[in-house]
């Protein structure tokens, strides 16, 4: 019987050499992931955050008046910057009014009808609710769904990048 031991030192050195390029790949991955999140979010706004546009019934008013009439899709920004470890990328809405509208669309809210709101509904041809009545705005999860989609895609990218580095492809 023969007893042998192999040292993985050469492989370890090669892996460390490959890792020198990882920060650049990480920065590129972060930027790509942030852009993908923006795209996923805008797509989800188009379907009101629902897969295929399905989900709880929306009111006639919402169907007749586009759900993203606020134009918040125009306020979604991606910011990237280099760091010593590669890069940071972020996707978000910096404009406070647009961010508030996006939060309401994503999480939903309860609104007490004012005279101004009543007049707005009437001007759009909707039956105006009485002042002081409550309107429930359901959350559409557009942002949350985009995060879930982006996480899955980003993890898949990281696995592919890591496998490539382990094979020496960089």
Image: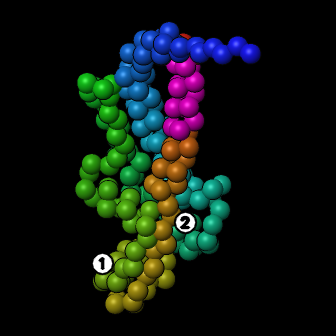
Does residue 162 belong to the magenta stretch?
yes
Which residue is at 43% across, 81% downward? 135
Q: Between residue 31 and residue 159, name the one nearer to us.
A: 159
Q: Between residue 170 and residue 19, name the one nearer to us.
A: 19
Q: Between residue 6 and residue 90, name the one nearer to us.
A: 6
Question: Where is residue 68 drawn, in percent x and y?
Answer: 45, 57
Q: Which element carries disc 1, helix, strand or loop?
A: helix
Q: Counting residues from the N terminus, which is met first, the one under dot 2 or under dot 1?
A: 2
Q: Which element carries disc 2, helix, strand or loop?
A: helix
Question: Where is residue 168 drawn, in percent x and y?
Answer: 54, 12
Query: What colouring method underlies this structural image?
Result: rainbow
Does residue 111 belong to the magenta stretch?
no
Q: Is residue 22 above or below residue 128?
A: above
Residue at the far front: name it.
Answer: 1
Question: Which residue has dot 1 on it?
Answer: 116
Which residue is at 34% across, 89% downward? 131
Q: Is residue 5 above or below residue 118?
A: above
Question: Which residue has dot 2 on it?
Answer: 64
Question: Where is residue 60 drawn, in percent x and y?
Answer: 57, 73
Q: In this rendering, would 105 be left or right of 60?
A: left
Which residue is at 38% across, 15% downward? 20
Q: Main secondary structure of the magenta part?
A: helix
Question: Where is residue 50 drawn, in percent x and y?
Answer: 59, 59
Which quarter of the rendering shows the N terminus? top right
Range of the magenta residues?
154-166
């Amino acid at each position: 019987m023969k007893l042998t031991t192999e040292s993985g030192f050469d492989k370890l050195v090669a892996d460390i050499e490959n890792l020198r390029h990882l920060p650049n790949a990480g920065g590129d991955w972060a930027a790509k992931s942030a852009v993908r999140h923006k795209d996923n979010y805008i797509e989800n706004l188009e379907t009101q955050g629902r897969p295929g546009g399905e989900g709880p019934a929306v009111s006639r008013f919402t169907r007749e008046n586009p759900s993203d009439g606020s134009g918040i899709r125009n306020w979604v920004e991606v910011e990237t910057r280099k760091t010593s470890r590669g890069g940071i990328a972020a996707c978000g809405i910096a404009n406070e009014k647009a961010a508030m509208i996006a939060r309401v669309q994503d999480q939903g809210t309860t609104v007490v009808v004012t005279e101004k709101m009543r007049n707005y509904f009437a001007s759009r041809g909707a039956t105006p609710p009485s002042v002081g009545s409550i309107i429930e705005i359901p959350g559409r999860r557009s942002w949350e769904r985009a995060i879930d989609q982006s996480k899955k895609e980003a993890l898949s990218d990281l696995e592919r990048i890591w496998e490539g580095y382990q094979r020496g492809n960089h």
